[in-house]
Structure formats: C-alpha cells, structure tokens
Image (cartoon, rainbow, N blue to C red):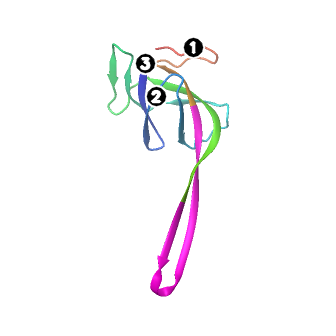
Amino acid sequence: MYAIIKTGGKQYTVKEGDIIDVELLNTDPGAQVEFSDVLFANDGSKTQIGSPAIANFLVYGEVLEIVKGEKVKGLKYKASHNQRRTWGHRQKYARVKITGIGSQRQGKGGKHGA
C-alpha cells in the first residue's frame, strides 16, 4: 500500500517503512505524528482519490531526528562599485519514519488499520 501526503507545502509518495525528510514539525524526536492531508491511496486493488483530501484517512509516522540540509550560498556582486555580499542558509528538516497507513485512528501500541 502506498499513499501521497501533503505536508509543509510539498507532496510525498510514501509507503510503510519509508524514511522521509519533511519541513520542520513542532515535535520532539521520538514523537508520533499523523498526516491527515492524504491526497491519494492505493492498496493494490483499491484506489482512493481525495478531493482535495481523503476523509477519515491518516498516515502515521514517528519523528526519528532533526537534521540539517545542504548549505545554500548566495552572492551579490557589483563590479563597477566593488561591492560584494555573501550569505548562506542551512534548512532544518524532521526525519520521519512512516509506521502505518490506515483509515482509522487507533490507540497507542495498536496496529494501524487499513
């Protein structure tokens, strides 16, 4: 089974066991997260398409750690004025392991339903 979820303004194709880097979430490492914006789900025989999201369908994950992305460098240069300005940025991401794809909300420790 796989699904397409939307988080942080981006879309990700996920299946159970995948590890993805998403925009920083307001959680600590080890926390359980639920993605409710599920746009598409397919279990091999049945396909569900949301409009815009599938109702009562969740993707579950666990935040493994907070990681930093690649450094992005910028440069402004004006030759005639001898002006230079450089800057850099390094985005932080939450590394999430997908633990389940299901249509029901389950209690802690239970298996996620399909």
Query: What residue sits right under mark 1 in the picture?
Result: 111
**The furthest residue to the bottom:** 81
Of label 1 and label 3, which has the lower sequence position? Answer: 3
User: Residue 73 placed where, x, y %?
Assistant: 54, 62
Q: Nearer the viewer, residue 48 or 84?
A: 84
In the displayed structure, 113 sits above or below 76; it is: above
Query: What residue sits right under mark 2 in the picture?
Result: 14
Name the secondary structure under disc 2: strand
The residue under label 2 is which amino acid type?
Val
Q: Residues within 10 Å of mark 1 (few under 14, many from 20)?
A: few
Name the secondary structure under disc 3: loop
Mark 1 and mark 3 residues within 8 Å of each other at the beta carbon? no
Magenta-highlighted residues: 73-96
Q: Nearer the viewer, residue 21 or 79?
A: 79
Q: Is residue 81 left or right of residue 31?
A: left
Q: Is residue 77 magenta?
A: yes
Of badges 1 and 3, the one in the foreground is 3
In the displayed structure, 87 sits above or below 108; it is: below
User: Residue 109 placed where, x, y %?
Assistant: 64, 16
Query: What residue sits right under mark 3 in the picture?
Result: 1
User: Residue 94 placed where, x, y %?
Assistant: 59, 40
Q: Nearer the viewer, residue 55 or 49?
A: 49
The residue under label 3 is which amino acid type?
Met
In the displayed structure, 46 sits above or below 14; it is: above
The residue under label 1 is which amino acid type?
Lys
